[in-house]
Amino acid sequence: MQTEKLITPIAHAFPVGSVTWGVINGMQVVTRFVGSDEEEARKEFLGIADASFLGKFGVKGRNAAQWLQDQGIVVPEQPNSWAGNADGSLVLRLGGSEFLIEDAPGGNLCEKLLKADAKPAGVYLVPHVEASFVLSGNAVQELFAEVCSIDLTRAALGVQEVVMTQFAGVSVVLMHQDLEGEARYRVWCDSSYGPYLWEVMAGIANEHSGGPIGIGNYFSAYQ
Amino acid sequence: MKLLTCPVNGTRPLSEFVFGGEYRVPPAADCSDKVWADYVHNRHGAPGIKQEWWYHAPSGTWFIAERNTLTDQVIRTFLKGQEGKQ
């Protein structure tokens, strides 16, 4: 039996009953974990939010970069780097010839790309259904130090760098972004590992007086 | 912590990598049965400088590491076909 709506891949990690559920972009997600004041306080120390509902689009191949440019997409020039489109969507270059595009909050670029004209030779679609997280706060580097072996401070990361590494044994893609006046980290992982990674990171966040918060704390489009 | 350098993603802990076996060049397709059987069944186990396949799991990158299997010292790593660019 198919469910009527998509549900976030992190759903199994969320407590039953004590959180507020909603539907964003056709996906059931938790929109609030605790009261708004407490979420604000958590965000200050170490906030973690579920952004898995944002549309994603993947493409790879020797002509992928050119095809994306033909669609009006800003393509990062260096491998393992990212760029932002004017509408706020993200374009991550994963290695040399593979790209992950994520919609801006409220955007539908990925849907347009999926419906775009037939892809030419050397352009191959890559399905993306990753679990996606937003992290921020004063103690975010302490969290990284607990789950990852490499230096992820802003100075080490560079400005537009994409890092593919492991968090608590799970392969992740990570990038840093200054958005809406604050520093944030974005993390993507295979959706089947989503609940595990959420539990690990949320547990560490709780130890630092932070914790899970609704996505509206990060993207004003969902407040 | 042991470290290995992926030619694309940089130096990372060994736990991010998977060993893929020795890099070996197959004999010509028209080689003798004896040469082919030797390629398929036999491995040269003596320690020394060898080229090995390694896989960086988070990024899906296969590359070749030249490693002294006696001292465990990695001499260099490179993508296949880019040996001369090191």
Image (cartoon, coloured by chain):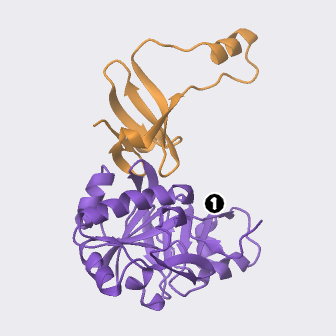
Q: Residue at x 59, y 26 (%)?
A: B25
Mark 1 Cα-neighbour bin, 10 Å: few <14, some 14–19, many ≥20: some
User: Residue A38, located in which quarter of the rendered image?
Assistant: bottom left
Q: Quadrant of the N terminus of chain A?
A: bottom right
Q: Quadrant of residue B33?
A: top right
Residue nearer the viewer, A180 or B31 = A180
Look at label 1 and name its amino acid.
Answer: Gly
Chain letter for purple, please: A
- Residue nearer the viewer, A129 or A207: A207
Judged from this view, the residue extending furthest toward the top is B34
Question: At x 47% / y 85%, what residue is drawn?
Answer: A88
Indicate the position of residue A200 as horizontal and vertical percent values. Answer: 38, 57
Residue with the mark numbered 1: A61
Q: Is residue B84 visible?
A: yes
Q: In the displayed image of the protein, which residue is found farthest to the front?
A: A17
Which chain is displayed in orange in the rendered image? B
Q: Position of residue A112 (x, y in %)?
A: 67, 82
Q: Residue at x 22, y 71 (%)?
A: A138
- In the rendered view, tell whether residue A109 sits above or below residue A125: below
The relative height of residue A176 versus residue B80 in the rendered view (above or below) is: below
**Count of marks placed on residues:** 1
Visible residue check, residue A54 = no
Q: Quadrant of the C terminus of chain A?
A: bottom left
User: On the rendered structure, is A93 left or right of A152?
Assistant: right
Residue A8: x and y in percent read 56, 70
